């Protein structure tokens, strides 16, 4: 049994899979990625799973066909969000996600939802400016429609998406397609420059800051978190950098 996971990305993005290493490295500095107030029902019995069969869609018709290939019927409102992304020149990156074994998989149809959007965002200098790399793994919660049994799972690694960007960008418009009432977001932002915290949209906040070295480069780290109402429309996260040192927002770690 598999489920699909899709997100809009810039047209010129390089998309591949990431190992768990980046998440482990950041978590050693910043602490556990699961928020303290994250409901237990979303991570009890949590299983690590594989992701595979990466796919890029350049138009809505092809995207719908790819989803149907795996027995997924796109809801009208959710599809409209993807169509909006395509009209803005983005493409849709998709993958299959292994679903934990269950007794009656047919009872879990259309009952899977992202409950924690977890990502590491790295901004690095590049010959043509700055380049952002998103390492994304979503925590998923699947519910048996008739009896209420549940499965919680998360990819061991994740998506890796790299593209030119002067700011730190992360897609959030799809939050309205999440079936649970609240979506948690945990973003660890790594950059040489301090994050411009004045640009953070509500309810995002810097929960913690730190410093780390990854692949021979030194970074400031900003853990940005939020709880989002899935009935509300959200614009994509898009925050720039500041020339000034960041204010103290939490314990510093080397």
Image (cartoon, rainbow, N blue to C red):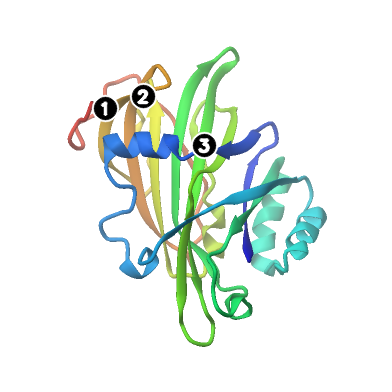
Query: Which residue is nearer to you in this view: 135 or 226?
Result: 135
Q: On the rendered structure, is 13 left or right of 172?
A: right
Q: Which numbered disc flags the more N-terminal residue, 3 or 2?
A: 3
Q: Are marks 3 and 2 in contact (CB under 8 Å)?
A: no
Label at residue 134: 3
Vertical placement of residue 24 versus 39, above or below: above
Q: Looking at the image, is mark 1 or mark 3 earlier in the sequence?
A: 3
Percent position (x, y) of residue 72? Answer: 70, 67
Spatial CA span between label 2 and label 1: 8 Å
- The mark closer to the camera, 1 or 3, is 3
Mark whose residue sits in front, 3 or 2: 3
Q: Residues within 10 Å of mark 1 (few under 14, many from 20)?
A: some
Instruction: Give 238 or 54, whichever is nearer the viewer.
Output: 54
Could you tell me which quadrant the N terminus lies in? bottom right
Indicate the position of residue 129 as horizontal and vertical percent values.
55, 17
**Pointer 1: what residue?**
246
């Amino acid at each position: 049994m598999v489920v699909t996971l899709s997100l809009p990305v810039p047209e010129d993005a390089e998309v591949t899979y990431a190992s768990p290493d980046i998440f482990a490295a950041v978590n050693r500095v910043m602490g556990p990625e699961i928020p303290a107030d994250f409901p237990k029902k979303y991570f009890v019995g949590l299983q690590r799973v594989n992701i595979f069969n990466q796919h890029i869609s350049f138009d809505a018709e092809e995207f719908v066909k790819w989803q149907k290939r795996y027995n997924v019927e796109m809801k009208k409102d959710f599809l409209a969000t993807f169509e909006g992304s395509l009209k803005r020149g983005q493409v849709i990156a998709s993958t299959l996600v292994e679903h934990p074994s269950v007794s009656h998989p047919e009872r879990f149809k259309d009952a899977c939802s992202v409950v924690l959007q977890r990502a590491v965002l790295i901004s690095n200098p590049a010959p043509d400016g700055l380049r952002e790399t998103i390492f994304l793994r979503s925590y998923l919660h699947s519910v048996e429609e008739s009896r209420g049994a549940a499965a919680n799972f998360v990819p061991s690694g994740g998506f890796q998406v790299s593209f030119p960007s002067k700011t730190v960008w992360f897609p959030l418009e799809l939050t309205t397609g999440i079936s649970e009432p609240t979506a948690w977001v945990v973003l660890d932002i790594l950059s040489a420059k301090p994050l411009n915290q004045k640009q953070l949209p509500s309810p995002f906040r810097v929960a913690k800051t730190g410093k780390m070295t990854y692949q021979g480069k030194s970074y400031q780290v900003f853990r940005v978190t939020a709880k989002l109402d899935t009935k509300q429309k959200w614009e994509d996260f898009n925050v720039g950098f500041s020339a000034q040192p960041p204010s103290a927002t939490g314990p510093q770690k080397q």
